[in-house]
Amino acid sequence: MKFILPLAALALSCCSLAHATELIEVARSPEKIWNGVAVSSTGRIFVSFPSLQEGPSDHVAEIGRDGSITPYPGGTWNDPTPDTPSRNHFIGVNAVVTDPHHHLWVVDPAGRFGSKPLPGEAKLVKIDLTTNQVRRVYAFPTDVLPEGGFINDVRLTGSHAILTDSGLGALLIVDLDSGRIRRVLSDDPRLKADPQHRLTINGKPYLNAQGKTPQMHVNTLDIDPDGRFLYFQPNGGPRLLRIPVPLLCDPHTDDATLAAAIEDQGPTRFNAGMTFGPDGSLYYSDIEISGITRRTPDGTFETIVSDPELIAWPDASRIGPDGDLYFPAAQIHRLPGNQPDGKSRLQPPFRLFKVALPRP
């Protein structure tokens, strides 16, 4: 289905330590939650729809210049027939990322977080943005993604893809040439959410229908501009971690060596996405303040934009060729299972924003 909604630029009086910031609305989803965005080098915008609500989902869509939402790449990938093999259609998408070689990568964990994804059906899908055709599908068998595992997000580096398993707490390394997948650091406690760590949103405790803080193991990740380190963390932190990329992608490196190579980079933010700027600043989709926080190269924090009503649960972000940061407001905390009384607080439509970043 294709939606078109009128758009408007929203100029806000946003809190910032460096400058006044204009928040621009890029598009709206009338009913469905979106949780991630990818922007190609030519400015094409793609979004992911997680399976968090009742009813059918497009899973992946392209946003037109007029704000229209069109299923991507189309056909049975988004709207399968009863006899379409599961390998050839989306089941429960969670993330989208573009690469410099004009590909879109789609993370399909085959279900939604907190449920039981279909075992052996999770996949990483490579789509050629020139032809708009699927080029390759990387399947995650149960020996690398056991029951309870949930592939969440991905980053590309050379001939490898690195994904987080947020269900059990591990990293997955895909050799994109051979298709072989390694599961690493699955026993390292630093990749697990700390059940004693309390999270807040706009100063209030984040509690679910069981009165507990929702937990997600290693989730957000990004590679620094030099390609030297992968930065990662459970979404609530409380510490930001990094590990050398070449060591991580070396198939001969064992878990003990990898664990010893993890470096603690200090306190972090409760976030649903992290994106490096070209100067080495790290931009958090900061759930705590309903906005975007910048971690400067020297480790200090500053607020770029914050608005508890408009930017409700900022999710996975990317920088476009215009130098702006794109991100969706996903409202994940407003889902009934993430509310203390078990009642939905969702307020459609769901918005996709962009914001100008500090220029050198």
Image (tube, rainbow, N blue to C red):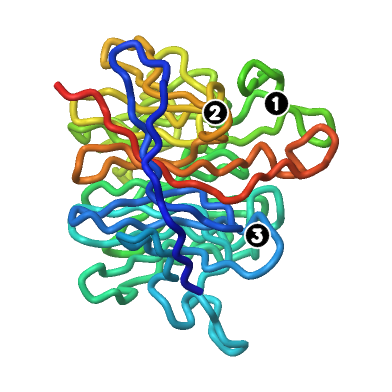
Q: In which quarter of the image is the C terminus?
A: top left
Q: Is residue 301 left or right of residue 128?
A: right
Query: Which of 142/213 is in front?
Result: 213
Which residue is tagged 3?
117
**Which residue type does callout 3 highlight?**
Pro
Residue type of the residue flagged with mark 2? Ile
Figure check: 127 above or below 303: below
Q: Position of residue 143 (x, y in %)?
A: 56, 58
User: Does the residue at mark 2 contact the one at mark 1 (Cβ under 8 Å)?
Assistant: yes
Residue that appears at 38% across and 31% down? 11
Would you call the spot at circle 2 few (<14 residues within 10 Å), some (14-19), or many (20 or more)? many
- Residue at the location (76% across, 43% down)? 337
Give the CA distance from mark 2 to mark 1. Answer: 10 Å
Q: Is residue 124 left or right of residue 210?
A: left
* Residue type of the residue flagged with mark 1: Tyr
User: Which numbered dot is residue 206?
Assistant: 1
Which of pointers 2 and 1 lies earlier in the amino acid sequence? 1
Mark 1 and mark 3 lie on one chain; the one further toward the N terminus is: 3
User: Which of the 4 image quarters holds residue 209?
Assistant: top right
Q: Which residue is drawn at 54% across and 31% down?
A: 235
SS category of the residue bearing label 3: loop
Q: Mark 2 points at which residue?
A: 287
Residue 14 in sight: yes
Dot 3 or dot 2, earlier in sequence: 3
User: Which is more foreground, mark 3 or mark 2?
Assistant: 2
Q: Most extreme residue toward the left, as rendered?
A: 360
Q: Is residue 142 above or below residue 278?
A: below
Residue furthest out toward the bottom = 83
Q: Is mark 1 on a helix, strand or loop?
A: loop
- Between the C-alphas of marks 1 and 3, the distance is 25 Å
